[in-house]
Image (cartoon, grey):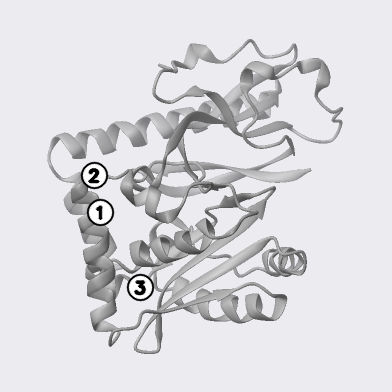
Amino acid sequence: MRSVPLTFEAFGLPVTRAELAVEALPALQPLSSLNPADLPNIDAVDGYYLPSAVLGDAATNGASPAALPPAPTGFFWLERGRFPRYFLDLTQSYDDFLAGKSGKTRSTLKRKLRKFETLSDGNIDWRLYRSPEEMRSFHDIAVVLARRTYQAKLYDAALPEDPGFVSEMEHRAETGQVAGFLLFLKGEAVAYLYTPFEDGRVIYGFLGFDSAHRDLSPGTVLQLLAMQWCFEQEDLTVFDFTEGEGSHKALFSTDTKLCADLLLLRRTSRLLFLANAFRSSRSLSQGSVALLDRMGLKARIKGWLRKSS
């Protein structure tokens, strides 16, 4: 059993949330293969959580809300979000990856690396952390940096600091199932990337960078350096950028699946009320963001918020 939040938004930003106790099913499960008869028995929880259930290929699936199958008797579907999920094939070489990009993209990525290298006196200082002791050092440095990032201040999406996360991180390190990456500029950490591993899949866990150095693209630079390392590891086969849009995810990916974050909840008055409130909040938030976009204010406000963070 695990706790899953329902986040209520205003203007695309989180306002408050309610926690649901659910039985989590494996991620990236094709929804077409879900058989209600195979679901584990649950008694004291609100329902089931299907993280990133695969609806189909993002390039061909129109994915209307009607694509969800009928819910089993006594349950109802609640969709927390629908999104492309990007993947990068690590069985190719780094050179092959670059060759698959346009000349303009290759030039842009190389320019970002050269710019950072020049400011680093000819040698980019990036560090890899793997062992339990190394991961503890990584976490100590990264959480201080994370508090300064816009991911923390606007979206509560920075590297976690709670003991449960640290314990899981250390356990993964003991079994070789995690890596941490830090990028430094003149001795100061300016970007971090945390990547757990699952059966050869590199999971895009947490990435953040110091917004004071955003003109140097430290997040992109660290992502490229980390990817070069991943390409060299024979036991790693795919880089999973997880749920959500992102121009950098589309830039680095080689495949895309259309996914939905789904809850299969008991049909109770409490859960029906929360579900309706969540849908209303999401609809109003999306409407307000769309209005700001049409007025030409969305990009300005987003940029102002990032700078002010």
Tell me what residue is drawn at x 55 percent, y 56 percent.
205
Q: Position of residue 258 (x, y in %)?
A: 47, 28
Task: Let me know if residue 153 appears in the view.
Answer: no
Name the foreground residue: 185 vs 146.
185
Task: Let me know if residue 155 appears in the view.
Answer: yes
Q: Position of residue 166 (x, y in %)?
A: 68, 69
Mark 3 or mark 1, earlier in chain: 1
- Which quadrant holds the N terminus? top right
Q: Quadrant of residue 12?
A: top left
Q: Position of residue 138 (x, y in %)?
A: 57, 77
Name the residue carrying label 2: 102
Name the residue carrying label 3: 210
Q: Residue furthest left?
A: 296
Say what secondary structure mark 3 lies in: loop
Name the foreground residue: 128 vs 228.
228
Tell me what residue is drawn at x 15 percent, y 34 percent.
294
Image position of 54 with respect to 188: above or below:
above
Q: Position of residue 276 (x, y in %)?
A: 53, 26
Say what secondary structure mark 2 lies in: loop
Q: Amino acid at mark 1?
A: Arg
Name the residue carrying label 1: 106
- CA distance separating discs 3 and 2: 29 Å
- CA distance separating discs 3 and 1: 24 Å
Q: Amino acid at mark 3?
A: Asp
Q: Are marks 1 and 2 in contact (CB under 8 Å)?
A: yes
